[in-house]
C-alpha cells in the first residue's frame, strides 16, 4: 500500500507565497515522475508542474516564473513553492506520483488534495 500525504495549503493574499509538500510512504520500490495538479470549482483538473526522477521539470504556462517544483529522492517528497500568487490560482492542489511498488507494479497515485485560496 502506498500513500501520498500533502500539506501546506491555506489562505493567502494576492502577491503572497505558499509552499506545498507531499510525502510518499508505504511499499515503494522507486518513484518515477512526480507532479502537482489543481482543480478549481467547475473546471477540469490541470497539470501545474511535473518533475522526473532525474530532476527535469515542466510547468503550465500560467505558473511559469512564479512556481517552482522540487523533489527530495532520499525522503520521497515533492514540493511546490508558489510565489506571486493570484486569485486565479485558487484551487484544490493534488500531488501525483508514478510509483513502482515493492511487488514491481507501476501505478499512479494521488494525494487527498489541499486547498489553496488566494484573496484579492
Image (cartoon, grey):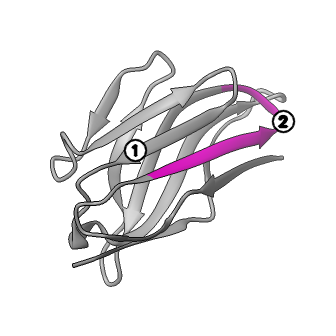
Pinpoint residue 7: horizontal percent, then vertical percent: 61, 57
How many numbered marks are there?
2
- Quarter-of-image position of residue 113: bottom right
Circle 1 — which element? Answer: strand
The residue that appears at 35% across and 43% down in the rendered structure is: 49
Q: Which of 98 and 76 is in front in this view?
A: 76
Q: Name the residue under label 1.
A: 81
Residue at 76 percent across and 26 percent down: it is 104
Location of mark 2 (residue): 27
Do callouts 1 and 2 mark residues in contact (Cβ within 8 Å)?
A: no
Q: In the image shown, does 61 or 29 lie closer to the viewer? A: 61
Q: In this view, does 45 lie above or below 1?
A: below
From the viewer's perspective, is residue 98 above or below residue 72?
A: below
Indicate the position of residue 24 as horizontal and vertical percent values: 70, 41
Which region shows up in magenta? 19-30
Kindly report the secondary structure that dominates the magenta region of the rendered protein.
strand
Residue at image position (74%, 50%) is 3
Residue 100 screen position, x and y as percent: 69, 30
Q: Tell me the distance, in whole angstroms, between the alpha carbons under discs 1 and 2.
A: 27 Å
Q: Does the segment drawn in magenta span residue 10?
A: no
Residue 54 horizontal side relative to residue 3, left or right: left
Question: Going 40% across and 36% down the picture, which residue do you hit?
Answer: 69
Is 27 a magenta residue? yes
Amino acid at each position: 500500500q502506498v500513500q501520498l500525504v500533502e500539506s501546506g495549503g491555506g489562505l493567502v493574499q494576492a502577491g503572497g507565497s505558499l509552499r506545498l509538500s507531499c510525502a510518499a510512504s508505504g511499499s515503494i520500490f522507486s518513484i518515477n515522475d512526480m507532479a502537482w495538479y489543481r482543480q478549481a470549482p467547475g473546471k477540469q483538473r490541470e497539470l501545474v508542474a511535473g518533475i522526473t526522477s532525474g530532476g527535469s521539470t515542466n510547468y503550465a504556462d500560467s505558473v511559469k516564473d512564479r512556481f517552482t517544483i522540487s523533489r527530495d529522492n532520499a525522503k520521497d517528497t515533492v514540493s511546490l513553492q508558489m510565489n506571486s500568487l493570484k486569485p486565479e490560482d485558487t484551487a484544490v492542489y493534488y500531488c501525483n506520483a508514478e510509483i513502482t511498488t515493492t511487488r514491481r507494479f507501476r501505478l499512479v497515485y494521488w494525494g487527498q488534495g489541499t486547498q489553496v485560496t488566494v484573496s484579492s
